[in-house]
Amino acid sequence: MPRDNHATNPDGPAVVWFRFDLRLSDNPALTAATDSGRPVLGLFVQDEAGHGSRPLGAAARWWLAGSLRALQAALARVGVPLILRRGPAAVVIPDVLREAGAGMIAWNPRPMSAEQAADDAVRRIVAETLPHVAIADGLRRTALLHDPAALRGRVFTPFWKTVTAKLAPPAPLPVPPLRAGLSIASDRLADWGLEPTAPDWAGGLRETWTPGEAGAAARLADFLDQGIAGYATLRDRPDLAHVSMLSPHLRFGEITPGQVWHTVQTALASGRAAAPDADKFLSELGWREFSQNLLHHHPNLAAANLQPRFDAFPWRPDDRLLRAWQRGATGYPIVDAGMRQLWRTGWMHNRVRMITASFLVKHLLQDWRAGEAWFWDTLVDADPASNPASWQWVAGCGADAAPYFRIFNPILQGEKFDPDGAYVRRFIPELAGLPSAIIHQPWRASPLERAAAGVRLGDTYPAPIVDHAWARNRALAAFAEIKSNAA
DNA sequence: CTCGCCTTGTG
DNA sequence: ACAAGGCGA
């Protein structure tokens, strides 16, 4: 049947504009489009200018490619195309609606004010230039468990108590019965250059992750099956597998916090999870909500200290130190193992994130923003809220932050949370032969132990770039300089 | 106003 | 044991 390619049609297909909600289930926009009875056309717009959000880092771009491929395949199974376009959303969206002869557009609300402003701009342009296109509006919010506009959290515990007191997320939506629609022109994903080619550094990422909705569901099922038992304490052990690793899936909206919440409740009710473990796990979702709340109320979270007195902090920018930290060559095994896990897999265990971040900020006196930028580029789960909020928390300048004087001892942290050195051995094989009792401080190994393990300090593995006790005192002195400033 | 809380460390 | 700062119930 001939088709007018340059006019919208009230009976035409519904375009579902995907953003970081790359899933079919619990997707109100997709459900609204299906409920309208129209055939569905998926759309993802790569808007390098950001469209109200921060341009992705390299690891997140890799993840996005995988997630789009997974979404494209899932939609293709029911005959629905996923159209890829590049450019400013306010230009691309009207173009696509005209080309598709669309009668409707639907998208899920986003939580940040800049995102809402960007979406409002698109809404206005569509309403003004394409009045026959219905806009699915006021849909259920699924990106967060709470409405950040309705609450302002400065301290985590009361914030999370307030949220959980009335927490009853509606039952997640099932995958709707999609009607296939005709396709229009689409970019080729490969042409977006999201994935590295020369060099291809993504091998460790591919081994570790399955981006996409199915991968997210499998990860959650696996965690509830194997990992959540003992979570309350074992979650701090980077050598064990007792964390969910859901963070990148949540970041790209391949699973919603509401789906996680309901799945955990079901596991609780059937006795497959214990209450202390489930509560602790859900409180980690709480930290995610807390960070999003902070970003909502402080859009400049990644750039500005939440505590202005830190504006006068005497950082000592030093590229040599920063690079040593980035490469995992500080001479402190737990720090280096973490940085190498990050480089290899695009992810780092939460406990080790705190240790490595504390080390950069306090032992090396590098501005937390330099560390935040590195994590932003290398983490597959790099989140515009969680990443800066957590860095500010560690640096002591954030909301409900760890006091600055609380300086992690990388040796004690290693011995406490990687007691057998298994985590260090996995990511620093050149230390693998050292006895467990000394593996977190190889400079104290005896000459005989080092020879037996083939460890030559300053050669096969670096000597510590700073002395812990000295660095600790220097950090405390630096903090004392800003202590008297009003908070 | 006190007390607990906040993903501690040192002596 | 004791250290350090701020917030909120």
Image (cartoon, coloured by chain):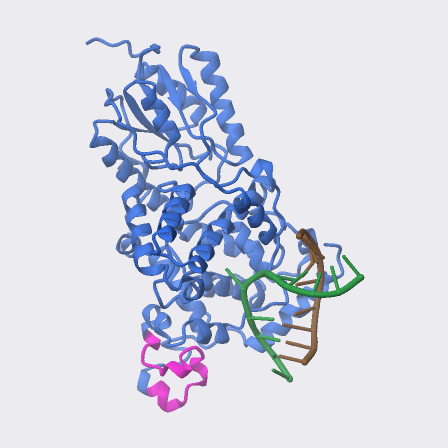
Chain colours: A blue, B green, C brown
Is residue A448 found inside the magenta-colored segment of the image?
yes
Where residue A422 appears, as percent x and y from the top left, is 34, 73
Instruction: Look at the image and tell me whether residue A16 can be seen.
Output: yes
Q: Quadrant of residue A298?
A: top right
Quadrant for the N terminus of chain A in the image: top left
Q: Residue at x 26, y 21 (%)?
A: A184
Q: How many marks?
A: 0
Residue closer to the observer: B1 or A411: B1
Q: Is residue A368 left or right of residue A72?
A: right
Q: Quadrant of residue A99?
A: top left
Which x, y percent locates residue A368? Answer: 56, 56
Q: Is residue A135 above or below residue A359?
A: above
Q: Give the magenta-colored segment's residue range.
A: A430-451
**What's the residue at 31%, 73% (across, down)?**
A429
Q: Position of residue A451 (x, y in %)?
A: 33, 87
Residue that extends furthest to the front in the rendered view of this protein: A270
Q: Is residue A327 magenta?
A: no
Q: Is residue A45 above or below residue A417?
A: above
Front residue of A370 and A317: A370
Q: Residue at x 30, y 24 (%)?
A: A41
Q: Position of residue A107 (x, y in %)?
A: 41, 27
Q: Is residue A331 visible?
A: no
**Above or below, comparing residue A107 to residue A440 in the picture:** above
Which quadrant of the figure contains the C terminus of chain A? Answer: bottom right
Q: Nearer the viewer, residue A12 or A330?
A: A12
Q: Is residue A274 left or right of residue A308?
A: left
Answer with left or right where residue A403 lies relative to residue A379.
Answer: right
